[in-house]
Image: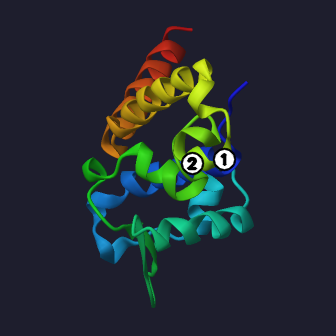
Amino acid sequence: MIKLSTKGRYGTRLMMNLARHYEEGPQKATILKSVADAEGISIRYLEQIIIPLKINKLVKSIRGAGGGYTLARKPSEIKICDILHSLEGTCSLVECVEDPTSCDKIDVCGTHEIWKAASVMMKNYFDGISLSDVVEMTDKKIAAAKKKSKKT
């Protein structure tokens, strides 16, 4: 089974939370404690996750009173692939797709072509989804859940 680590999953949730508050402007930066509470993620873990996101210029920190974190770009300009690349590394299923020197059988390995093609499809999929898209998907699910709970 291929799985994203918690770092990738929680980092995406952190970024989605920041995207939800992006329109409030930099004067309303989000503190990690509020994200931790809202998402049910350890504050210590978020402190570790925010570092590579900041290094890769996906988030920026605001100092002083009312400080915290905000997105470095519009949510529509940040792709899921950007987040995963910052937190997980390259977006490929196996190491040999990104680093041909990692395996001496690439020239004769038929499965390499399968992993390579699947990795390209996965990268293209994640590259086609922005944070804005994720916020929109979440809003639709929340609305549907509210509608369903009213019926019962």
Q: Quadrant of the C terminus?
A: top right
State the residue at coordinates (53%, 45%).
98
In terms of depth relative to the viewer, which is nearer, 17 or 146? 17
**Mark 1 crowd level (few <14, some 14–19, many ≥20, 10 Å Cα):** few
Q: Quadrant of the image for the N terminus?
A: top right
Mark 2 lies on a secondary structure that is: loop
For label 2, the crowd category at 10 Å Cα-Cα, with few meaning under 14, some 14 to 19 and many 20 or more, is few
Identify the image quadrant of residue 124. top left
The residue under label 2 is: 99
Residue 24: name its quadrant. bottom left
The answer to whether the residue labelled 1 contacts the one labelled 2, judged by CB atoms less than 8 Å apart, is: yes
Answer left or right for 64 relative to 75. right
Question: 145 left or right of 29?
Answer: right
Q: How is the image coloured?
A: rainbow
Disc 1 from disc 2: Cα separation: 6 Å
Q: Amino acid at mark 2?
A: Asp
Left or right: 133 as drawn, with respect to 106 = left
Mark linked to residue 102: 1
Question: What amino acid is at disc 1?
Answer: Ser
Up the image or down, 92 lies above or below 38; here it is above
